Image (tube, rainbow, N blue to C red):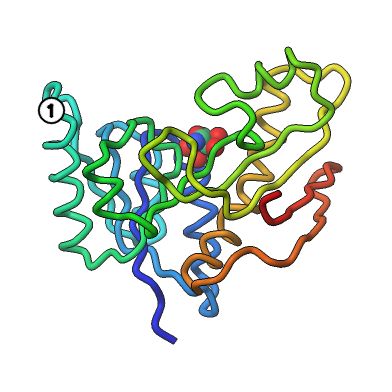
Amino acid sequence: MSRKQLGILISGRGSNMEALLKAAQDTGCPYEPVLVMSNKPDAGGLDRARGFGVAAKAIDHRTFGKDREAFERAVDAELKLAGVELVALAGFMRVLTPWFVNEWAGRLVNIHPSLLPKYPGVDTHKRCLEAGDVAHGCTVHQVTAGVDEGPAIGQAEIDVRPGDTEETLAARLLKAEHLLYPRCLAAVARGDGVRVSDEVVVDGDTIRIFAPR
Ligand code: GRF
């Protein structure tokens, strides 16, 4: 089996990146991480990636001033040099220009901490709590020019618990993210959708995984 060569873009701690790298240690995994890149040189995820034996590079977006596309062209060149075929955004905190999105159209995915189309953008846990929602979740989706707007590939949902704070909800949802992202990415690498729904209990939380509604 030829494994799809994967590039991962991060900006921070990289726990979702780590979930992708762990899943790829299974020889049956249809993707192979070959390069992790960060726009922040001090991103903790860079060393975590190296610990997995994966090449990790930073390109500081600040050195390009306001020229977002110039930054992206530098990232794009590194991805192509590494033979990357599929790009996963994992806590990458830069909005991408239409140029980059178009260059990687259909081969660019993101994980967002809400049940899209609910709560695109920031502060998703806060907004979920303020709305009094009984459930919260995360979405893996194709990246298109509109922020958090691309077609969903898979979603995972957990219950909001009485007394949940932004922090407790975020921490519990992160476990669902770590479960969902490798599954969805594997589906994309194989060229199919997430067709099987599943329920997994992690640390007392039932995580419900399903294809987009
Ligand atoms: C995650 O909550 C992800 O959904 C969002 O940014 C956060 C990144 O966390 N896009 P990590 O760097 O993967 O730990």
The local crowd at label 1, few if under 14, some if 14 to 19, many if 20 or more residues have their Cα within 10 Å, is few
Residue with the mark numbered 1: 67
Picture layout, residue 119 above or below residue 56:
above
Classify residue 147 by image quadrant.
top left
Q: Residue furthest top?
A: 130
Give the answer, above or below, for where 21 lies relative to 131: below
Kindly give the residue lying farthest to the bottom in the view shown: 1
Residue 76, image x and y in percent? 19, 51
Position above or below: 192 against 7: below
Q: Is residue 189 above or below residue 2?
A: above
- For the point 21% across and 64% down, the residue is 82
Is 55 on the left or on the right of 163, as rendered? left
Closer-to-camera residue (207/122)? 122
Which residue is painted at 57% across and 59% down in the image? 184
Position of the N terminus by quadrant: bottom left
Report helix, strand or loop for mark 1.
Answer: loop
Q: Quadrant of residue 41?
A: top left
Q: Residue at x 18, y 31 (%)?
A: 68
Identity, as a three-letter code, of the amino acid under mark 1: Asp
Please state the horizontal and vertical placement of residue 62, each as a whole percent of the image: 17, 24
Q: Residue at x 38, y 72 (%)?
A: 4
- Where is residue 178 shown, x and y percent of the image? 61, 49
